[in-house]
Amino acid sequence: MFFIQMSGFPGSGKSTLAQAIAKRTGAIIVDHDIIKSALLTSSTEALDRKTSGSISYEIDWQLIDYYLGLGNNVILDSPCLYDELIERGLSLQKKHNVTYKYVECLLNDFEEINHRLASRNRKLSQIASINSKEDFLYSVQNSKKPEELKCLKIDTLQPLESYIDEVIDYIQNDHYKILGKN
């Protein structure tokens, strides 16, 4: 069994890659944006984005724990901007004795990110664009990664077909052989 933590700036291709992995492996995707959007839509009181984000992460972790406990492979589709996300992922990996994998979707093209953000079918919780190249670069450079684990970095500017086999091989390889850019 495995638990995959996706990482990457909004619009970098995390959801597309998570869906392709799930199709090939039968893994369950816990999509942070679906949960956060549901909270923002259904709340009778106005929730700010920070509060809804905090609540939705707690729901994410409860679902991941539940699905791993049932013996399912699980993918967390969410940017990884907080150390707590790594800590909780590693904690659940130990609790359920599953393989933990970290896949980072990199798209270091500010214009392409904005194009993808503007052209996608956006959920309520998702950003429509990013105005500052500096904010974009800061977020990309400061995403959190597990220090004790080799992580797979994927250039998602390339077509999905050009890297999906590499990702599947990384997920299924227990020796942490890194096939992509590291």
Image (cartoon, grey):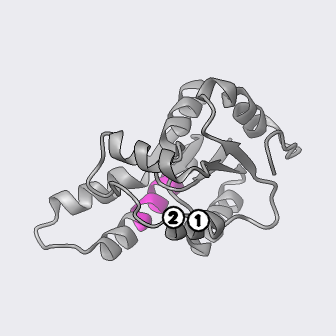
Is 97 displayed left or right of 125 in the figure?
right
Structural distance between the alpha carbons of marks 1 and 2: 6 Å
The residue labelled by disc 1 is 137
Q: In the rendered view, would you say 160 is above or below 124?
A: above
Asked which quadrant contains residue 7, the reply is bottom right
Q: Which mark is residue 133?
A: 2
Q: Are marks 1 and 2 in contact (CB under 8 Å)?
A: yes
Amino acid type for the residue under numbered disc 2: Lys
Q: Is residue 178 visible?
A: yes
Is 14 displayed left or right of 40 in the figure?
right
Amino acid type for the residue under numbered disc 1: Leu
Q: Does the magenta run of residues contain 59? A: yes
Residue at the farthest left position: 44
Q: Secondary structure at mark 1?
A: helix
Q: Secondary structure at mark 2?
A: helix
Q: Nearer the viewer, residue 120 or 35?
A: 120
Q: Does the magenta run of residues contain 33? A: no
Q: Position of residue 136 (x, y in %)?
A: 52, 64
Residue shown at the point (40%, 62%) measured from the top left: 59
> Magenta span: helix, strand or loop, mainly?
helix
Residue shown at the point (35%, 57%) measured from the top left: 127
Residues in magenta?
Answer: 57-66
Q: Position of residue 165 (x, y in %)?
A: 71, 27
